[in-house]
Image (spheres, helix red, strand yellow):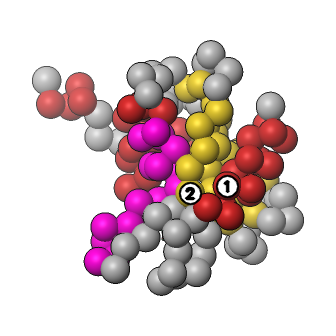
Amino acid sequence: MKEKLLEEAIQIRARAYVPYSEFPVGAALLTSSGKIYTGCNIENAAYPSTCCAERVAIFKAISDGETEFTEMAVAADTKRPVPPCGTCRQVMSEFFAPDMTIHLTNLNKDVQTLTTDQLLPFSFQKEDMD
Ligand SMILES: O=c1ccn([C@H]2C[C@H](O)[C@@H](CO)O2)c(=O)[nH]1
Ligand SMILES: [Zn+2]
């Protein structure tokens, strides 16, 4: 499944709306029921209104009623496997198990696989507000 997710993440970059950065990113998220949700980055003339590929994929899945995820892939044309931004890491920590695997890649298919907790250790959680 890892290879399929990497391929889908690379392919969905074609749908990215990136007139400002010209830097398309793709993501593919696997649910525990076996469904794949893809996402691409969607930019805006008001730059901070941009949504990253990772969050588009996660929010598509959540809005479809999905709650359990097993694996994610993220791809961009980078020298090293693309590192997700801090906001996406925080959103991943909200919805993914601490030991869920996230495959980061580039167009050479160099892959770095990390867990949610490795991407954002000591993340703020809803239990911290109890
Ligand atoms: O992991 C990442 C890193 C960057 N971007 C997007 C945000 C913006 O559209 C562009 C440049 O930062 O890349 C993502 O979608 N995911
Ligand atoms: Zn991000």
Tell me if 62 is positioned left or right of 13 in this view. Answer: left
Q: Are marks 1 and 2 in contact (CB under 8 Å)?
A: yes
Secondary element under disc 2, as helix, strand or loop, is strand
Tell me if 64 is positioned left or right of 9 in this view. Answer: left
In this view, 69 is above or below 120:
above
What label does residue 25 carry, if any? none
To which residue does mark 1 refer? 12
Q: Is residue 75 visible?
A: yes
The disc labelled 1 sits on which kind of residue?
A: Ile
Is 59 included in the stretch rendered in magenta?
yes
Q: Is mark 2 within 8 Å of ligand 1?
A: yes
Magenta segment's dominant SS is helix
In this view, 34 is above or below 80:
above
Q: Which residues are magenta?
A: 46-60
Residue 101's spot in the image, x, y percent? 64, 35
Q: Is residue 84 visible?
A: no
In this view, 30 is above or below 77:
above
In this view, 106 is above or below 69:
below
